[in-house]
C-alpha cells in the first residue's frame, strides 16, 4: 500500500544494488573517456560503464546515425528484413573470424548466449553445455545457469534451477587448482581436465563448450598459449560445438575486432553485445557457421524477441563500426602496452597479488602478502572487504573502476579512445587509493 506521506519523487531501482542508495552515482553527461555526475563532478570512466562504451561517450557519428534512422523508420519487426539491419549484418560478416557470416540479432548479451545455446542444442541434438567456473554469461534464467559465478547463479536459481549446464575449471595461473610449472604445462593440464569432464559427462550428451576468449568480470584472465587450440581440437574430436562469448571481449577491447582473434582459433558460434553499438542502443547477436545457419533456415526458428535487431540499434552499430575502423582499434592496441606497464608498477604494493589482462581489459587482484589468499573472499566470508574500499577511494580521486567476480580484484576497461595521459591519471589514482587502504 502506498504511503501517503511519501513524496511523489520516484527513482528507478538500480541493478546490482547493494541496498545503499548513497553509493549510487547519478551520471548526466559524458565526453570521450570522461563522465559527469549531477553535481558537476567529472570522472575518468575506466570501466566504460559496463565494459561497453567502447567508442567513448558523446560520439556524434553514432548519435547522428540514430537520429537519421529514427526519422526514416524507427521500428521494424524482428520477423521482417530492414535495410539498416541487413547492412549491419553484412558489415559484421566482413570482420567476424572464419566463415561466421550469418547473424541472428538479439537484444542483450544474456539473450545472445541463450540463443547460441539453443542453436547448438538444435543443431547437435545434444542437451548439455559446458562452461567454466568463475565465468559470467548473463543473469537471466538460461544464461544464469551457464554462469560459473555462484553469486549470480545462486541468486537466479534460488527458487527455480535450469538444467543442462555443467562446469569445468578455467586455465588460471594465479592461485590455480592446477600444479603447473609453466604456461605450456598449464595449457596442457587445463585442456586435459576439460577432456576428462567431457568423458565423464558423456560426449554424445554435450552440445557445446562456451567460453570467453579472455575472462571478463571474472578477472581478465588470458589463457596460456596453445590452450584455445587444444580446446578447439578436443571439440572437433568429440563433435562438440565451440562458442566464443565475445560480449565483453568484442569490438576492439582486446586489440583486435574480437578477442578470439588473439588466439588464432575460429569458433562455431560467436556471441556479441555491448560494444556492437558502443552501448548507445541495446543490441546483441550470434554469428554462426554456414552449416548451422543452413540448418536453422531449413528447420525454422519458432521463437524471437520484439526488439531484436532494432533499426535504431542497427544504425548505431553501423556507425560504431565506422568509428572503430577510424583508428580506435589501432589506438586500443597501441595503448595496451602503456596500460600494462603502468599497472605492473602497482605490484610494488604488498597487497597487489597479480596483474593480468590483454588489450584494454585488465585486472588487479589483491591478496594478503603473508598467505597469498584474498583479504576477504565475498563468496565465502562475511565482513568488510578492502577491495570495496579501493574502488571507493579510486572514485573519490575521480576515476571509476569495476569490481570483479569475486570482488577480490578490480577490473579496468577504458573506452578505446583513451590516451596515455588519461591512463597515467587513472593509475596514479589507483596507486594512491591502494596506499590509502592498505598502508
Image: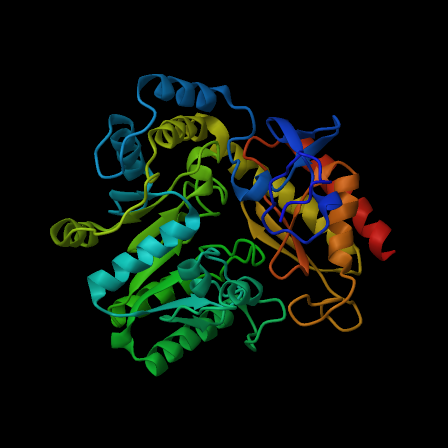
Residue 266: tell me if it is visible: no
- Image quadrant holding the C terminus, namely bottom right
- Residue 100 in the image: x percent, y percent? 26, 47
> Viewer-proximal residue, 202 or 353?
202
As drawn, is 29 to the left or to the right of 109?
Answer: right
For image coordinates 35% across by 31% down, the residue present is: 314
As drawn, is 36 to the left or to the right of 102?
Answer: right
For image coordinates 60% across by 40% down, the residue present is: 12
**Toward which corner of the image does residue 123 lie, by quadrant?**
bottom left
Residue 321: tell me if it is visible: yes
**Direction bottom: furthest residue:** 200
> Viewer-proximal residue, 188 or 259?
259
> Viewer-proximal residue, 284 or 338?
284
Numbered circles on residues, count: 0
Compared to residue 60, the image places residue 180 above or below, namely below
As drawn, is 266 to the left or to the right of 190?
Answer: left
**Direction right: furthest residue:** 439
- Residue 189 in the image: x percent, y percent? 47, 75
- Residue 17 in the image: x percent, y percent? 64, 51
Compared to residue 35, the image places residue 378 above or below, namely below
Compared to residue 162, the image places residue 243 above or below, namely above
Compared to residue 188, the image places residue 24 above or below, namely above
> Viewer-proximal residue, 243 or 110?
110
- Residue 155 in the image: x percent, y percent? 55, 64
Amino acid at each position: 500500500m502506498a504511503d501517503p506521506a511519501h513524496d511523489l519523487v520516484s527513482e528507478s531501482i538500480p541493478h546490482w544494488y547493494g541496498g545503499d542508495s548513497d553509493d549510487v552515482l547519478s551520471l548526466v553527461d559524458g565526453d570521450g573517456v570522461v563522465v559527469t555526475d549531477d553535481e558537476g563532478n567529472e570522472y575518468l570512466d575506466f570501466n566504460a560503464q559496463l565494459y561497453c562504451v567502447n567508442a567513448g561517450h558523446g560520439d556524434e557519428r553514432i548519435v547522428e546515425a540514430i537520429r537519421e534512422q529514427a526519422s526514416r523508420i524507427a521500428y521494424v519487426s524482428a520477423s521482417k528484413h530492414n535495410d539498416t539491419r541487413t547492412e549491419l549484418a553484412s558489415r559484421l560478416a566482413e570482420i567476424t573470424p572464419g566463415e561466421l557470416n550469418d547473424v541472428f540479432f538479439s537484444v542483450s548479451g544474456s539473450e545472445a548466449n541463450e540463443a547460441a545455446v539453443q542453436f547448438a542444442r538444435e543443431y547437435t541434438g545434444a542437451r548439455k553445455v559446458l562452461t567454466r567456473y568463475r565465468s559470467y554469461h548473463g543473469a537471466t534464467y538460461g544464461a544464469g545457469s551457464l554462469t560459473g559465478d555462484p553469486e549470480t547463479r545462486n541468486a537466479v536459481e534460488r527458487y527455480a534451477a535450469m538444467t543442462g549446464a555443467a562446469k569445468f575449471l578455467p586455465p588460471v595461473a594465479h592461485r590455480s587448482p592446477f600444479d603447473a610449472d609453466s604456461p605450456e604445462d598449464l595449457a596442457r593440464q587445463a585442456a586435459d581436465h576439460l577432456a576428462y569432464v567431457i568423458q565423464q559427462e558423456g560426449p554424445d550428451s554435450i552440445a557445446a563448450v562456451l567460453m570467453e576468449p579472455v575472462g571478463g568480470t571474472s578477472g581478465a584472465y588470458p589463457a596460456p598459449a596453445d590452450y584455445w587450440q587444444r580446446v578447439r581440437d578436443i571439440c572437433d574430436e568429440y563433435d562438440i560445438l565451440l562458442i566464443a562469448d565475445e560480449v565483453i571481449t568484442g569490438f576492439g577491447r582486446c586489440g583486435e575486432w574480437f578477442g578470439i582473434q588473439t588466439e588464432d582459433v575460429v569458433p562455431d558460434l560467436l556471441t556479441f553485445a555491448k560494444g556492437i553499438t558502443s552501448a548507445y542502443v541495446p543490441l546483441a547477436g550470434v554469428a554462426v557457421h554456414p552449416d548451422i545457419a543452413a540448418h536453422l533456415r531449413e528447420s525454422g526458428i519458432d521463437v524471437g524477441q520484439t526488439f531484436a535487431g532494432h533499426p535504431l540499434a542497427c544504425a548505431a552499430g553501423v556507425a560504431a563500426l565506422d568509428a572503430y575502423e577510424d583508428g580506435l582499434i589501432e589506438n586500443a592496441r597501441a595503448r595496451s602496452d602503456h596500460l600494462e606497464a603502468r599497472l605492473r608498477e602497482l605490484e610494488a604494493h604488498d597487497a597487489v597479488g597479480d596483474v593480468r589482462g590483454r588489450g584494454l581489459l585488465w585486472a588487479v587482484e589483491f591478496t594478503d602478502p603473508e598467505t597469498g589468499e584474498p583479504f576477504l573472499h565475498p563468496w565465502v566470508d562475511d565482513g568488510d572487504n578492502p577491495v570495496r574500499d579501493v574502488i571507493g577511494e579510486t572514485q573519490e580521486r575521480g576515476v571509476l573502476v569495476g569490481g570483479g567476480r569475486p570482488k577480490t580484484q578490480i577490473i579496468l576497461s577504458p573506452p578505446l579512445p583513451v590516451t596515455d595521459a588519461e591512463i597515467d591519471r587513472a593509475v596514479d589514482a589507483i596507486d594512491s587509493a591502494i596506499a590509502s587502504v592498505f598502508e
